[in-house]
Amino acid sequence: MSAPDYPADEAVRLLALKRTALLDSPAEERFDRITRLAAFIFNVQTCLISLVDADRQWFKSKVGLDACQTERDISFCGHAILHPDIFIVSDATKDDRFSANPLVTEEPRIRFYAGAPVCEPGGQPIGTLCLIDPQPRDLTISEKRVLRELAGMVEHEIARLDQETLQQKLSAGMTRTATIMATLPDMVFVIDRNFRFSVCNDHPDLLKPQHEILGQKILDVLPNELGHQLMDNVKQAFENGNVIHHNYTFAKLNKSFEARYKKIDENEVLIIIRNTTEQTAAHSAIRRLSEVARQTTNGVVITDIRGFVVWINEAFTSITGYSIEDMLGKKPGELLQGADTDPATIVRMRAALALQQSFNVDVLNYSKEQQSYWVRIACNPLLNEEGELSGYIAIQTDITKEKRYEELIHNSENLLKAVIDANTIGTWRLNLQNGELVINDKWASLLGYELSELLPTCRNTWERLTHPDDLAYSAVQIEKHAAGLIPIYEANIRMKHKNGEWIWINTRGRVSTRTNDGNAEWLLGTHFDINDQIQAESSLNEKSKQMEAVVESLLDGIITIDSKGKVLTFNQAANEIFGYSDEEIIGRNISMLMGSPHREHHDSYLSNYINRGISDITGRIRELDALHKNGTTFPIELGVVEVKMAGETNFIGIVRDITQRKSREQEIHQLAFYDSLTLLPNRRLLLDRLQGAITHCSRANNFAALMFLDLDNFKNLNDSAGHNKGDLLLCQVAARLVQSVRQGDTVSRLGGDEFVVVVSDLSDDKETAANQAESLAQKIMAHLTQEYDLEGLTYNSSASIGVTMLGRRN
């Protein structure tokens, strides 16, 4: 019995099967009707619609069988999906692949099997419509055609299910879009080519009621300078397709707004306007704080990863008396620490640096004139763009001026607490020292609770309601913010609603107070329901799968050509794949990258497609040979899509060098079908060749011979001279056997010192064929008895050989 092989694209096939959602689904009359009809038409005991899963075959519909599934290893359908046409086993008891199969030797005692592959809409074979009977039989051509038609009916039902699912998703998406529009915190407009409002959501910041805006032109709603600005930005969006940003302020209302314009298509522009009044006030406050930081008298020192100084500011020199020349290449502690510097503080700083962590300490240092002074040092790691440690930055604050700085910090914290996101709903305060949590009623209502149902609250309340997969990330973000590594704590998390569902919440916060030793104490923040936003993003992702596929392929070569084959763009990956620079390839014909025969016929391919719509290149992935700059050919995987750019037909090709993949496939093939020592066909390939020889005998009405060889005294050689000499002898024997037979014959190693030779195309006369086989056997024996040179060891060997004839009845 042989288990069925797996298709080369098994992972893709299984994914396609899962997407149908048919596995383990209830019985359906539309499928059962087909199996009943097939069983009646063909008068068989059993008819199945079988879906081939990873390790089983599961029956979506069945007639004449009680079992719901069987293992894939013993399935007939696992073999059937490997064939494009109907797979037939006339008598399983006489078929080496199935004669020992428990489905044949035991119930249901299969003799006859016929399976037509069933494909999902994407073309992947996910199962079969199969006929099973305990009596041997075969199918006529017309019966095969009927079975294929019935399998087509199954495929039609699967495709119809897929279309219904897509329609349901589209309807749900439109409903979600309408809901999102109604709940968005921004004003949303769609303007047509005539500058009329075709879409407008209801919003408290609208200058007029919604019904007075829809259908009106911009200047009818805003007949002033702002209206003309709006029209100019809409025109600009139509022309270039980029996002246009526009900020404006209503002085009378003391409100500021940010508008973004983006072309939807050739007839409409989307405008999203956000009230940025509080954000503008916050930015003004931040600018004032930045000016304070620029003029600060804090000393700043930057070191490399080993702690050696690379830069200090003037304030550092003013505090310590050391110039940049004094400090360069030295560790700060070597010059600044003295007799009364606290050893425990030094240990704490060194331990933090060893762990590449931040630290905040108060330490007694000494100036260049050996005058002691107290400073507060805040030291943080510096990370490069890859997130790797590149050094440290330490800020020194003279504590004698601490009162003034405390006042500035206090004012800054009050300012930060006043800057609240306009879209927030729930508010919370978390004490990082004792876990106390204070929330408002809206925080509770977001999760479907009354505030009283959650009281008393503590940090455990939040942790208990937060999804386990999101809790760890949120905790890390809080720790980073508390340590000063990130300016704000923010995370999108799932929290459990009272009804048991998980909803998405945006949580953000800032440290509002610190303890006397500088540790973060109270964290003040907000919660905002973003469940609809996440669902909208998910819907958007589903509608842009084609674009995502292109983006995901950007690591491959991306080449754009025009309708005449001239290269327009050639990305860096394409440069590396083909060896050409942009200057060498841009403007040239794409055929210079192709091997024969595509190189000579590429222009006609394009001409047939442009003029007659005949295409063999777009809409599918192909494998072909490409031509490198150095003249070598190599295999590539190519996908081509047609795009319209400025009214012209262009083509975008996505190219992947599959040289390594092909090499791995060849290696796998070698390991699967050839003996690793002698490189002769192994038992598996031998059986395939033997079956082919038998089939050929039947068709050609001639004879073949099967020879079995066993080396004499081979064990004695292994025992006396070692296995290395034995392996050399086996390799030389294999070479002599190959030289002794014709090119179309097969020499195989079964294992140990046993070899098999399959000789085809002997005479159609049995006696003549036997004489031919005997002559070849004598020739082989003569070759094998010649002297061997086993790397200095002269050795003589002989072999025993047995011959059996194969004819059309074998």
Image (cartoon, rainbow, N blue to C red):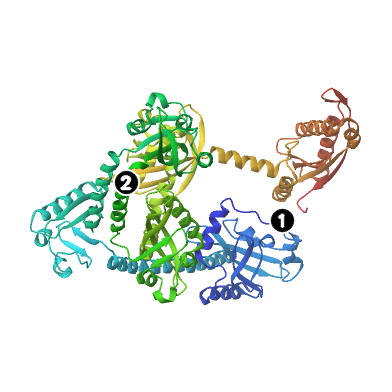
Residue 218, image x and y in percent?
A: 13, 59
* In the foreground, 423 or 139: 423
* Neighbourhood count class around disc 2 (C-alpha, 10 Å): few under 14, some 14–19, many 20 upward: some
According to the image, label 1 marks what residue?
Answer: 2
* In the foreground, 83 or 536: 536
Q: Please, what secondary structure does the residue beneath circle 1 have?
A: loop
Residue shown at the point (82%, 31%) measured from the top left: 724
Q: Quadrant of residue 728?
A: top right
Q: CA distance from mark 1 to mark 2?
A: 82 Å
* In the foreground, 809 or 329: 329
Looking at the rendered structure, which numbered label has been put on residue 405? 2
Residue 473, image x and y in percent?
A: 48, 55
Q: Earlier in the sequence, mark 1 or mark 2?
A: 1
Tag 1: amino acid? Ser
Q: Quadrant of residue 587?
A: top left
487 versus 677 height, above or below: below
Residue 347, image x and y in percent?
A: 54, 40
**Viewer can see residue 777:** yes
Tag 2: amino acid? Tyr
Q: Please, what secondary structure does the residue beneath circle 2 have?
A: helix
Looking at the rendered structure, which numbered label has been put on residue 218? none
Q: Residue furthest top?
A: 792
Q: In which quadrant is the N terminus drawn?
A: bottom right
311 versus 216 height, above or below: above
